[in-house]
Image (cartoon, grey):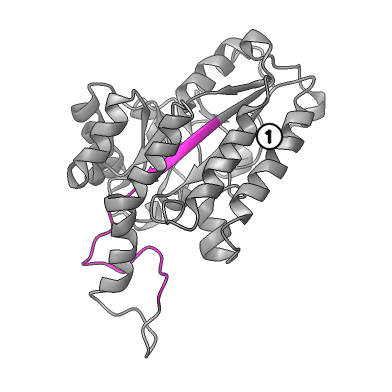
Amino acid sequence: MKPLERISYSSIADRPALKLPGGKRLAVWVIVNVEEWNIDETMPRTVLTPPAGGSPMPDIPNWAWHEYGNRVGFWRMLEVIDALGINATLAINGSAIGAYEPIAKAAKERQWEFIGHGFGQRNMQKVPDEVEDIAKTTEAIRAYTGKRPRGWLGPGLTETWHTPDILAEQGYEYVCDWVLDDQPVRLKTRDGGAIVNVPYTQECNDVAMMLIQHHKASEYRDRAIDQFEQLYADAKDSARVMALVVHPYIMGAPHRLRYFREALAHIQTHDGVAFMTGEQILDWYGAASPASTAA
């Protein structure tokens, strides 16, 4: 299905007001992306290009750059998240659960939500069998946590025309790939049902800021605070959702970590904020805007 077959245009100014519990006005969720990069394939992203150009294999420098994040960077970020008492959401490759089991264990012990992020870090359009890839990811998370994942984030937010349908058919209740609104929305699926899209972000995302736009490290804090202040003001009459996205190999670098901490600390000073996980946002939205009454 094409996008406009799944969702019609809706002005946020014309919708019924959404209210968060406890008088809160802005739901903020922190998504930590943990991936396994296959050394036998072209690296998903690069920090260093070879002297003669091209994409040589094996690509040890760029594989090691990412590996640092899981060996060191994640644990730095975890200290920040723990110190601030935030319950994060872990978007994880199915293969990464076994490859980096101590990370999965740390998230499980803290009762973080696990959401599917592909079995490996590969565009969904390039996965040989999308149905199998999603099923393998689901089973890897279920086998480790004892609970089926309810949410999905495509690697690089990638989808085929059929991804939302396959996800719904495999029991997923929400997806994060459609960054088109500040409130959850429902996407129609081919079985006549729907899957919810929970607001994610391409702007307050360390990949976009640091690797694509090449900003200095402090841009993460500055942009996150600016994004927050506007969304907080927007939410005075109807709730909004803000996402903060981090990757251990990017924000877990020594020179960037402080700006992640400072952004979160600023947000925590506001009484109208509810830090939530993706499934908590899903459940709130389902109760606040039942499918039968949703626009």
Q: Is residue 150 above or below residue 164?
A: above
In percent of the image, x 39 and y 37: which residue is there? 79
Q: Main secondary structure of the magenta part?
A: loop
Query: Looking at the picture, how far across and down is residue 87, in whole percent?
Result: 44, 26
Is residue 178 visible to the viewer in this orientation of the structure?
no
Q: Name the amino acid type tagged 1.
A: Ser
Is residue 132 visible to the viewer in this orientation of the structure?
yes
Q: Is residue 248 above or below residue 238?
A: below
Say left or right for 140 vs 287.
Answer: left
Q: Which residues are magenta?
A: 29-48
In percent of the image, x 38 and y 38: which residue is there? 78
Q: Is residue 56 above or below residue 133?
A: below
Residue with the most extreme bottom position: 52
- The residue that mark 1 highlights is 8
User: How many numbered circles are shown?
Assistant: 1
Query: Looking at the picture, how far across and down is residue 14, in whole percent?
Result: 81, 24
Q: Quadrant of residue 191?
A: top left
Say left or right for 83 vs 205.
Answer: left
Q: Is residue 32 magenta?
A: yes
Indicate the quadrant containing the C terminus: top left, top right, bottom left or bottom right. Answer: top right
Query: Looking at the picture, how far across and down is residue 111, in whole percent?
Result: 34, 23
- Name the one closer to the observer, 177 or 226: 226
Q: Mark 1, residues whose alpha carbon is within 10 Å: few (<14), some, or many (≥20)?
A: few
Q: Quadrant of residue 285?
A: top right
Q: Is residue 174 above or below residue 1?
A: above
- Name the one closer to the observer, 191 or 209: 209
- Name the one closer to the observer, 46 or 226: 226
Query: Looking at the picture, how far across and down is residue 112, in whole percent?
Result: 37, 27
- Name the one closer to the observer, 119 or 252: 252
